[in-house]
Structures are given as structure tokens and as C-alpha cells.
Amino acid sequence: MDYELRVIVEKVSVSSQEVVQRDTLKVYDVEAPASILELGLRHEEQISLLEKVQNSVLAAQSKLIDTGYDQCPRCGHKLHKRGFSKSKFHAVFTDHKVGIQKHKCPNPDCNWQSTPSTSSVFGTAIHPDLAKLQCEQGALHSFRKAERNLETLTVRRRPVNNHNNVKVLTNQVGAALAQEHLEPLAAVKSACSAKEVILQIDGGHIPIKEKDKRSFEALSATAYRPENVLTIDKHHREIANKSCALSAQDDELTTMKIFTLNAVRKQGMTKKTHLTALADGALNCWSVISSLTPHCKKLLCILDWFHIAMKFQNVGGAVGDAFTESLERVKWTLWHGKPKEALSKLKLLMTNVTDSKKRSKLKKLYDYLEGNQAYLVHYADRDEKKLTYTSQVAESHIDTIINDRFKRTKKMQWTRDGAHYVLQIRGLVESEEWSDRWQVPVLTALMGAA
């Protein structure tokens, strides 16, 4: 038996259940699929069907749109209806024309008439769900790649998804979030207080547009409770719940300090909380961390073992195999909580190196450890007690949040503000807060643009 499938939209009276209008949107012949390609609808067919459904819904809704005009705003006469004004509306996957009722003043001395549009009625012609998607793509990929991704999703080129539109909207939403993040969070209630919070802070360099400058630094902080670190397998762990703070502003760390305080408070830090903070040894990182001292019970600063190990690895590769064993002894001594002895061994090693370049590498390692001597701990003891001593579990977020977006294309250059705004969205995505918090900044940006 042969069949066909009809996709039909019916307009039905609620009171009588009478079908007032019936439209056949699409008729499909039902045949045995010869391949997986013929099973169901192709991507383009699905978008096309969705467009027809949207048009039917919009046609019914448009007649009910209240433009807000009953009387003439000039002379007060009762307005007459005067046809419909076709206005653009951009849904998530498709573009449409919405017919909105026009009005005209019957007073011959006035002659006022309305020209309504989706923007004048709703504040924007772009559906917020589409704007959300544009911001996600613009924050996670280059703006041109975002445009291509959106084209792939909708199977057509849409001017509303132009890379420049994506860039402008992403920046506007990021700016709204940046302003929102500057509002200090209220102190955490005792009932939600965390016994301990871990904070890891690091920096990444972003190519800059300014002449005679190569890059500027953006800071990234990740705060989490130790109990939220989950073991995936022998070699992998992940943080189940974390709060990120990011800033590219050149304001003597004022913004970053506020953002970081908000991040640790989201994780439950109070004046009863022990805060363990890890950094790579940069002074700006320690400065941000030290600003949290008044807000916690105790602050323990640790020079991150992940970065120490990387320093030793880089120096070892530069000075050669002849010094591998000596460097390993220095590293072992550091691991076992003997920083002064380690520095003495490293200094002695430097005196036995005649090559100036190799000695310079060792000197940099020595200066790095000596400058951060106050933050060196007994790493072996903390490891045995399963206490935090390395940021390795959170370190990848520097690559994920900063490097992947800002260094993927070598020709791409940024202003501080532009990078700062994109980072706000990326931080919310990484913290898994974006899905709950996107609506206010997106609507703020759309209404402001309109």
C-alpha cells in the first residue's frame, strides 16, 4: 500500500474546536529508504520545514501584536488601521518577515501614521536565543569561524550572522558582563561556608594591536573546593564545580582583585575558610592572592609544583644530559621541603658550569626559586597527605580559556577591552554558569543596540 505524509498546521477555535484554517506545509512520499541518507529528513529539509512552521506561527502571532497605539500621539484622535508593515525577524535558524499592524490618524490636519517594526515593538529584531548562540560562537572561536559555524548550522548564508555582527554583539554582551562582575558579591552566609577553598591563578599573553608592542597579559583564576576534584582514572582528574575570574584590564589589578574575590566567594569562602592559593611565581599573581587575606581565616601561598617541574624540564633540556643527575638532586631536595639546601646545591652547580649560556639558564632557575622561597613547601609531605600542591588539575584552563581563543590565529591581534569582553563569556562557559546567566546581558546588549 502506498502512503504519503502530510505536515499540516491547523488554526482551531478554542471554544468550539472548529478548524478555522488548515494549511498543508509539506507532503512527503513514504518509500523504503535505499540508504541511510534517505532515512528521515536531510539537514536542509529539516531547516526548510522549520521555516514553514515558524511562518505559520508568526502569521498567527503577528495579528495579535500590540503596537501600543490607540490614540494619535500628536492630536489624540482615535487611530484607524492602515494595512500591515513587513518587518524583519531573525529566529535561531531562519529569517522571516512579520506583518505588524499600521495605524493612521484620520485628522486631515495631523496625518500622523505609524511605521511599526519588530525592533520598535520588542526592542530588537533578533531572537535572544540566536544572540546567545552568536555570543557562544564568538567567544569560543574566531569571529570568522563563528560565522562559518553558524552557516553550517543553518545550511545557508545569513547576513545577521556576519562575522562583524557576531563581533559587535559578543563585545556588547561581554561589556555588560564585565560591568556586572564588578559588583562585589555579598559575604557568604555561614551555612554555606567552605572549610577550604583552592585558588589557582596564572597569566596568558595575548597579541596586541598597539604598535611597537607584541602582547599584553591577561590573568585567569580558578577557585574550587577540594572535595570537588574528581578522579577520572589513574592519570586524570577534573573539577566538578569551579568559578573562574578573568581580566585583561591594565588597572593595577583592581578589576582582577574584585573578580577573584567574587570567584572564591561563589565557592563559599568566608572569614572561617582556609584558602590555599597556587601561582607560577609572578608578582602580579601573588598581589591578587594577597588581597584576599582580610577575607579568609588563613591564607597559604604555594609556588605551584607544576610550574617548578616545567622550569626544571626546560633548564634540563638547555644545559644538556651532563647535568641531568645534578638537577634531579636539586629537584628532589625541593620536593622534600628543603629549599635552602636546594638553592645551595643549585648555586654550587652554577659554579661548575663554564658555558655562559648554560650558566645563565641555571641562574634564571636559581633567581626564580630564590624569589619565591617564601612559597616553597614540603611537597612530598603534602602529596602523602593528599593535600593540594599543584595546579595541574586546573592548569589546562589557561590553554582552554586564553591560548585556544587568542593565539589560534597568529595574525589575530586584540585590544585590551576586546579581549577582556570575550574572556567574560569564556569564563562563564568554563564555570558552567553561562546557561543560567546569559539572558540579562544578551537582552541588555540587544536593546541597547536597537
Image: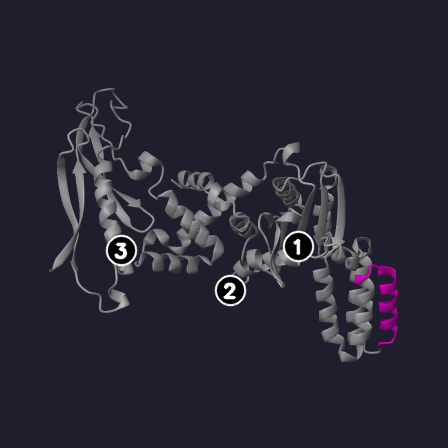
Q: Position of residue 161 (x, y in %)?
A: 36, 53
| Nearer to us: label 2 or label 3 | 3
- Figure quadrant of the C terminus: top left
Identify residue for label 3: 46
Identify residue for label 1: 202
The first of marks 1 and 3 along the sequence is 3
Identify residue for label 2: 409
Picture residue at 27% right of the left edge, 55% below the top? 46
| Nearer to us: label 1 or label 3 | 3
| Residue 351 falls inside the magenta stretch | yes
Q: Residue furthest front?
A: 1
Mark 2 Cα within 10 Å, few/some/many (few <14, many 20+)? few
Q: CA distance from mark 2 to mark 3?
A: 34 Å
Query: Bounds of the magenta span?
Result: 335-353
Q: Amino acid at mark 3?
A: Gln
Q: Quadrant of residue 233?
A: bottom right
| Residue 188 falls inside the magenta stretch | no
